[in-house]
Amino acid sequence: MNTTQGNGSPLKKELILVMGGALALAIFYFLPANRIWMNGQPGHYWTEFKQQRNRLAPETRKSERYGTAYTRSREITDFFDRKGIKQQVLVLVPGERYFKARHFIYETPEPSVFYYYTGLKTVRPADAGAADANWYVHLQNGRLAIDSVVDKKALADSIQSFKKTDASL
Amino acid sequence: MSTILVLLLLTLVQFAIGFGIITLFRIQLKKGLMIPLAVLLGVAVFSFVPFLLQLCHISLTRVSIFSSLAVACILLNIRAWRGIKGMAYFKSMPYLARPRWKLRLYEIPFLLLMVLIIAASAWRCFYYPPLPRDVTSGSEAIAEYAVREHTMINSLFSVNLESTNNPFKPPYIISLQLVYKLAGFPFGQIWLSVLFMAFILFLYRALCHTLHPLLSGLLLLFFLAIPEMYAYTFLILFDYSNAVFFFLSLYILFAFFTDRRPGHLALAGLLMGIATYIRPETLVLAAMVVPLMAWRLRQQKAGIKTQVRTAVLFLWPAVLLYVISIPVYINYYLPVKYHVPDLVNTHLLNLAPFFKRWWEMNAQLLFCRYGLERYGYFIYLFLLLLLAEIVVKRRFTAAGRNWLYAALVVYLGLPFLGWLLPLMDLDNTTKRGLFKLFPLLLLYLANNRLLTAFSEKINNWESKS
């Protein structure tokens, strides 16, 4: 740092420039959109950092980032993990609106994201392979229920029913 | 602590690789630019080596990837390690002849604030897993399974992919995620912070070459405070990296306009190739740069043959990387069919969608109520200073004209791409495609006559005893 010149004048000039810089920074900060951004993005992130630095387990970080999309998908996958059949199943999972219509919060991930989260293969009601599903997820008494497909006709009815709830699928 | 050490080691290797490339191309840049440029080039090589191994059907293991990176580092540095000839070259490098960076007291508040802003982004990048749906349904998911299955062509392709085309994007993110995951970062992603820091350092030093550090710091702060762009410094996606390499290519190309060093042209072409590897449609923007190149060469009395040869030398890496990463990789490697030509507009005579997209880009993205929330004051600062230069100075510097032309390429090129490739929507692709515009505007501002004159006044006042 160049602050030790023999002549006092350069240091004085440097201090004037420091004050000029501080003034420029103040103007920058007091422009409304900048202030909102500073407080809302980097500022807020530093506030979050204070808690986050003590919660470093990868699973916690995933749950925090992905929310119910991750935790509920994990819940479904754990069911198959416990049975030891995760690699053999194709699970029909209805879309988000199906759950929303029943006041159940679950932002259903699409099959590729579901697979990334959990390693479980899923299919959506409108997908071409929906009829190949051998398990399906639905809601029963306000809770996630997972059943095996015993009858292809019943599965086709379920697919139609899911599609009606969520036309976007 | 070990995490930080691993990160430092990876960055050091990136620097070494980049340094090798700089030496290989005999690049002569101004002081302070070499370190960030070397790191950025290293990131680019990291993003290509696993893909290259995949193309050669080599298993993507920790051993194969890190040994390949080590080999790349050694091979690229052979020239640097060659005795006397190399030393003579190093002595001619201004940044090695006088490597001192004199930090002034008045730079500190700006730099501190920037460090806080960058560190907040870096922490978030490290802490959270990748979020954008474009990567969790594509590159990140492929990288995650590539770690377990040692190939990019893995079980993700056995999943129902009707809802997404993301697995068919070039393996830039896959490769980087793979390297960092194998190095011990469970969510990868921290390479984006390395890229971000190196880019900001490069910009700061580039600004300082024409502007007083106070003005450089202030402009860079406005650039950092582009909310949409800042958000993508911790959300991995293609656009931020694409903007970085597109900018670097033009920076080196403009250096070539001045000194006509073949190495600068070659590196500019390589960097444009990397930008195209990240986002293939960049090839169109690269082609739009050619008229500027021809015009500049004409000014230097170059013949038509030279102009054509220069354009070909500039474009061929981008064409080659496009061919390898899109038609070759998708058609001959991926197990699921994806027909790229189907994405191209079939009604090319109807130009209405181009004008519509251009209008929407202005009215719905840049100059609207939410424009400030997305892009901050930066675009207004640019317009104000552009107008002031036109009114007061009535002409631009040669460098200023180059950057304005480049900005125009992006400003018109994005709606053009929206017209050519209808899948490129306004709210995602164009919105993030605008990231490419801002560094170009920043460098125009670095060559704005009013700002350079003001900087000169401060410098003169400062240096008078």
Image: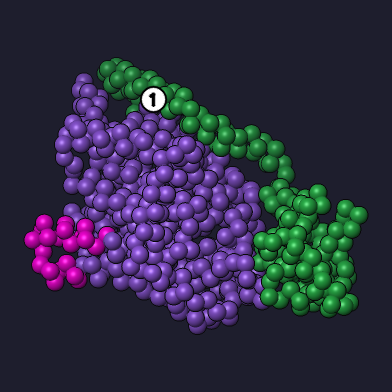
On screen, residue B184 versus residue B321, left or right, reads right
Q: Identify the residue under disc 1.
A: A24
Front-lying residue, A4 or B281: B281
Q: Give whichever of B173, A1 is nearer the camera.
A: B173
Percent x, y of residue B431: 46, 50
In the image, taking residue B50 as reference, residue A44 lies left or right, namely right
Residue B160 position within the rendered picture, expressed as x and y whole percent measured from the top left? 67, 72
Give the chain letter for purple. Answer: B
Which quarter of the rendered picture does the N terminus of chain A lie within?
top left
The picture places residue B329, in percent across and down from the top left corner, at: 48, 77
| Left or right placement of residue B318 versus residue A76 in this view | left
| Label 1: element kind | helix
Residue located 58% across and 60% down the image: B135
Q: Nearer the viewer, residue A46 or A78?
A: A78
Query: What is the three-letter code of the residue carrying label 1?
Result: Ala
Colour assignment, chain A: green
Q: Is residue A72 magenta?
A: no
Q: Is residue B311 above or below residue B370?
A: below
Q: Is residue B307 magenta?
A: yes
Q: Is residue B139 above or below residue B149?
A: above
The quadrant in which the C terminus of chain A is found is bottom right
Q: Quadrant of residue B449?
A: top left
Q: Residues within 10 Å of mark 1 (few under 14, many from 20)?
A: some
> Disc count in the image?
1
**Residue in the image at 30% along x and 71% along y:** B316
Residue B290: image location, x then y, percent: 24, 62
Instruction: Residue B192: tell me if it is visible.
Output: yes
Q: Is residue A119 visible?
A: no
Q: Which residues are magenta?
A: B289-309
Q: Residue at x 45, y 45 (%)?
A: B364
Q: Is residue A54 above or below residue A123?
A: above
> Which secondary structure type mostly characterizes the magenta part of the structure?
helix
